Amino acid sequence: MKIYTLLFFILISQIGFTQNNKQQIATQWISENIPLFGEGQSLNMTFSRRGPAGETFRFYHTMNGIEIFDSSIAVHVSKNNVVSFHANNINNAITRIDTTPILTKDQAMVKAANALNITGAITQREIKLYVYNHRGESRLVYRITTISEFLNGYWETIVDAKSGEILSTRDIAIYHKPANPTKPSKKNKVNQRPNISMLVDGTAMVFDTDPLTVTTNTYGGNYSDNNDATNADLDAARVAVILPEINFDGTLYTLSGPYVEIAELQAPSTGLFQQDNPDFVFDRQEQGFEAANCYYHIDKSMRYINDELGIPLQSLYNGGVIRYDPHGFNGADNSSYGGGSLNFGEGGVDDGEDADVILHELGHGLHDWVTNGSLSQVDGLSEGTGDYWANSYKRSLGHWADTDPSYYYVFGWDGHNPFWPGRVTNYGATYPGGLTGSIHTDGQIWATVLLEIWEIIGRDKTDAAVLEGLAMTNNNTGQQDAAIAVRQAAIDMGYTCDDIAVFTDRFEARGYTLPVFDCDPTACTIPEMTMENLSGCDDNGTPSDASDDFSTADITITFENAPTNGTLNLSGDATASISVTGLTSPHTFIGVILPADGTTIDITASFSETPACAINNPAIGTAPECEILDIIDNDVINKISFYPNPASETITIVNLIGEEQIEIYNLLGQKVKEQPLSSEQNSIDVSLFPKGIYLIRIQGYNQTLKLVKE
């Protein structure tokens, strides 16, 4: 087990670290550190996110229950129940107003469409009421965001909810490079997500990450765009890949799955590339190539985050499923993220052919989703995050050597050519003196320092710390505070002192100022231990044979003759007292047990209505702040399953023994349902869940089941 992947599946079962306890700590911190507000105003905790570094609670400033625009505070509580970071952008200039609108949402939408001169289909819209104070006075407004067919971008319109006055219109899409003029194209259709009836694996031929990287060539000759024409060299640069869990409705296969789906969002209209076979094999001059290439890289990145890093993460929009248009922007040479959707242009090298562009735009989405919509572009923070995410993946493939200039290229196929110069991750400027005021330029400082850390401690650790650190931040966070947050995430996830020293050294060398942190190696690492002469207790309280297998991550103790319906109680100086019901015989306990005093492990184990017996064992080292405790019966959990999957109405859990407490979490780390089940009452209603992926957790076991809600 890797220490940085203190998996979400384990975190949600940690003893003493319950959500309620952490929320109480965050709320208490708010009451002690944030001054009282004016009449009718309050802070409401309406969003929390749990991950490997702990839990972040977002408190939103409200007036009469209406959220105040751009006014909130994020409070992060570590696994050790300590407020280790906060990000504050509370607006103290709010004055009391009447919060009853005169306009309806539909009336406000008409005004927004007229203000933007929208002529084609509106493919995405959101409307929400806010108290707004960005023009020197507090007003009640509708904030309307739209994506439409012929108007490139993700547009925000602020409409006065009393008078109907348009207070502002602006494009809030995030682009991979400065916007270029657009050209018109034909009308496209509003996309509707197909109903999932079956998820099957497909195949595709893609660029991973681009034809120059896989062949270690430079741009030119047969390795040039040539107006999207293919040739033998570019065809040979494709690789065969699996597209896991794409939609099959019994007739057609669609590039749509649990994490991502193709959509028609902007002109030109090129279709959804549905077909009667699962093999999405195209050459690069066929329009289907960009469709399959985008799908593969977005889906692969999301699976890496959720399944390999153990970080629960999904889109805030569209039921958690990312929408992408592989041919958008009216044919212009640019791409963007906005409102959970990714749009890729076609000018120059088609953006959907370069995984750097795809993952850069996805990086903006990741930043948006981990902060519950509080992405920041201060100092180009999100631009640098997108560049980092793209280059992190490309470096991990190992095609380029660090002596090759292309090793540091971002947009190595789409850019660094006659179309535009691209960007780099060996940028020489330091913070803050090297800031230019251009977000795309300044983001290179952030991407460069993160990849310096990446080179020393590795991809997975750095990726996890970046995501968990950004999750603590807010929409006014710049690179300075983000550096503190990322290092704090590494601390909270239990990285070694050597790892933490790398974050400190590289950040400070780049110009950031970090708080002094004295790392205690016994407080943030799990020591190697060996178990000898281990014995368990049977139901009569007498010692019996026990198996042992102790490493940095787990200990196994098997109790023979455990009563099938009994209760096992474990307590001692190493752990909080816990109980497990519904035993089998033999019963296996697995977890990390760490001594309180650094010398011995003392555990008292007893079954219900039976005497107790003790286990005493010498141990090496101590790590009281890194405790992970989990209970599992391998024979039981390996048999527990559920059906159907995907599901639309109810699911049935099978092979339960006794009564079990079932918890279901979404990929934002939020618990959406908790329910006791037994072998007789074993169905769960999921009909009201939005479409997406959910994690089913059975209390007392460390395996988590994945549910796809259709």
Image (spheres, rainbow, N blue to C red):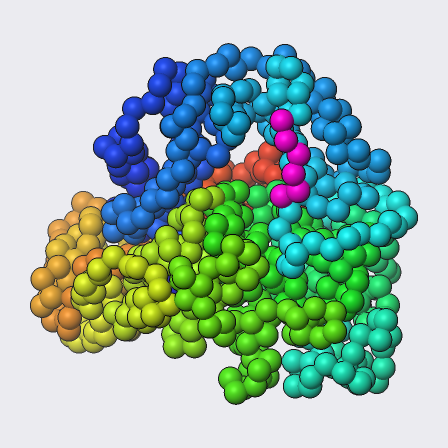
Tell me the magenta residue range. 167-172
Closer to the camera in the image, 31 or 627? 31
Q: Quadrant of residue 38?
A: top left
Please identify the quadrant where the C terminus is shown. top right
Q: Nearer the viewer, residue 73 or 608?
A: 73
Vertical placement of 370 versus 414: above or below?
above
Where is residue 660 shown, x and y percent of the image? 40, 44
Residue at image position (59%, 69%) is 423
Give 199 or 186, whichever is nearer the viewer: 186
Q: Residue at x 23, y 74 (%)?
A: 528
Specify whether residue 561 is in view.
Answer: no
Decide whether residue 575 is among the magenta residues.
Answer: no
Q: How many marks?
A: 0
Horizontal arrangement in the rendering, residue 674 relative to residue 11 (left or right): right
Whether residue 646 is situated above or below residue 43 in the rendered picture: below
Magenta: predominant secondary structure element?
Answer: strand
Looking at the image, residue 227 sits to the left or right of residue 30; the answer is right
In this view, which residue lies farthest toward the right? 186
Q: List x then y, in percent, for residue 629.
A: 28, 57
Location of residue 157 with respect to 141 vertically, above or below: below
Q: Position of residue 190 (x, y in %)?
A: 81, 41
Q: Residue at position x 25%, y 60% from top?
A: 626
Q: Residue 524 sits in which quadrant?
A: bottom left
x, y (%) of residue 655?
49, 51
Let me know if residue 171 is in the magenta part: yes
Quadrant position of residue 20: top left
Is residue 419 in sight in this rendering?
A: yes
Q: Is residue 652 left or right of residue 551?
A: right
Give me the residue at 53% from left, 20% from top.
139
Quadrant where the N terminus is found in the figure: bottom left
